[in-house]
Image (spheres, coloured by chain):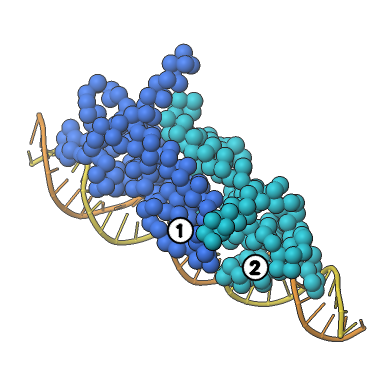
Chain colours: A blue, B cyan, C yellow, D orange
Amino acid sequence: MRLSKRGEYGLRAMIMLAGPSKDGSSPAMVQIKEIAEREKISAKFLEQILLTLKNAGLLHSKMGLGGGYYLARSASEITLGQIFRVLDGPVAPIKCVSQMAYEPCGCPDEQTCGLRLAMGDVRNAIADILDKTSLADVIKRQDAVRKKLK
Amino acid sequence: MRLSKRGEYGLRAMIMLAGPSKDGSSPAMVQIKEIAEREKISAKFLEQILLTLKNAGLLHSKMGLGGGYYLARSASEITLGQIFRVLDGPVAPIKCVSQMAYEPCGCPDEQTCGLRLAMGDVRNAIADILDKTSLADVIKRQDAVRKKLK
DNA sequence: CAAAAGTCTACTATTACTATAGACTTTATA
DNA sequence: TATAAAGTCTATAGTAATAGTAGACTTTTG
C-alpha cells in the first residue's frame, strides 16, 4: 500500500504551495527550484511532477522571469485525493473495486467475492480520507499541531 | 495503493481454506493444485506464496500423498492484516507512519508534517479494517450476501 | 538581448513484480 | 518396497514500474 515518490513529492509540493508564502502574497507563486531546495528533492524530477499536476489542472504557472507555480484553485477546493490520483492513479487496492478504473478481477462471482467485499471497504476508507481532506485542511492541522506544541 | 498479485492470490487462497471443504472435513486440507485450479492461478506461483505463508506461521501443511495445506489457527484467529503484511509488507503508505517498519521520511519536522499527519490517518484506516477482519468474518459476509441474493 | 523561469520529450538505471524451472524430500499405499 | 502424490527450496528470467537525468526549447521581464 505504498505511496510512490512521485506522489509523495507532489503532495509535499502542493501542501507547500497551499501554505503561507514568504512575502505574504496570494496566490503564492513559487519556483521549482525553491520547492526542490526546501523539500530536498531533485529539481528535475520535481519539474516533471509539477508539469503533470499543471496539465491535470491543479496548478497554474507563469513562465519567464518572476514566474513560478501557484494553485489553480483555492486550497480548500483541492483535495489530497485529486492530487494522489493524478500522480499515483486509482486509490483502490484492486481493480474490481475501483470507481475510477474498474476492471473485473476474474473471480467466479464478483458479487459474493469475499476479497472484493473487504477491499471495497479499504478503498472506501482511503477515498473517504483523501477526498475529504483539502489542502486547506492540511495547513489548518499543521498549524494546530504547532500551536499545541508551543 | 495497489495490492500485489502475490497478496491477492494469497488472500484468495486463505479465504478458500477458511471456507467449507468439499467433504466437510475440518480442518480443510487442500492441495496447491486444487486451489490453483479453482482460482485460476499458476500453481507454481501459488506454491511460493503458500510456502511463504507457511513459514510465517499462518498455514500448516502435510507432505506426501493425501497431504495439502490447512490453516494454522482457526479462521477467526487469522486476520487479513496478518496475511497482507506477510505477502505485501507494511500497510502504511509511507514509512514514517509505519508501525511495523518505521523510518524517518526526511521532512524538516515530522511532528508537524502535514503529509505525515494525513497519511497516518490513511494507515490507521486501512489497518483498522485489515486487522479487525478475520477470515471467519469474510466467510460470514460472503454467506450473508449469498443469502440475500437468493 | 540576456537571464530567469517553465515546457516537453527522450533516455537510463535500478528495483519490484510475476512468474517459471527443476531438483529434492516426505508420506501413503498397493 | 516401489511408486506416485504431495510439499520444499532455490535459482533464474522476462517485464513493467519507478525514480531520476539530460538536453533542447519557449516564454517573459528588464
Disc 2 residue crowd, few under 14, some 14–19, many 20+, Cα 10 Å: many
Task: Give the alpha-carbon distance from disc 1 to disc 2, as whole Å.
Answer: 21 Å
Do we see residue B87 in this rendering?
Answer: no
Residue B53: horizontal and vertical position, in percent? 68, 56
What chain does mark 2 sit on?
A: B
Kind of element beneath mark 1: helix
Q: Tell me the residue that label 1 is attached to.
A: A96
Residue B7: horizontal and vertical position, in percent? 57, 56
In the rendered image, the vertical position of residue B37 relative to residue A15, given as above or below: below
The amino acid at mark 2 is Ile
Q: Residue at x 61, y 72 (%)?
A: B37
Q: Which mark is residue B35?
A: 2
Q: Residue at x 38, y 40 (%)?
A: A131
User: Front-most of D19 and A132?
Assistant: A132
Q: Residue at x 45, y 34 (%)?
A: B118
Residue B13: horizontal and vertical position, in percent? 63, 61
Residue, far top:
A150
What chain does mark 1 sit on?
A: A
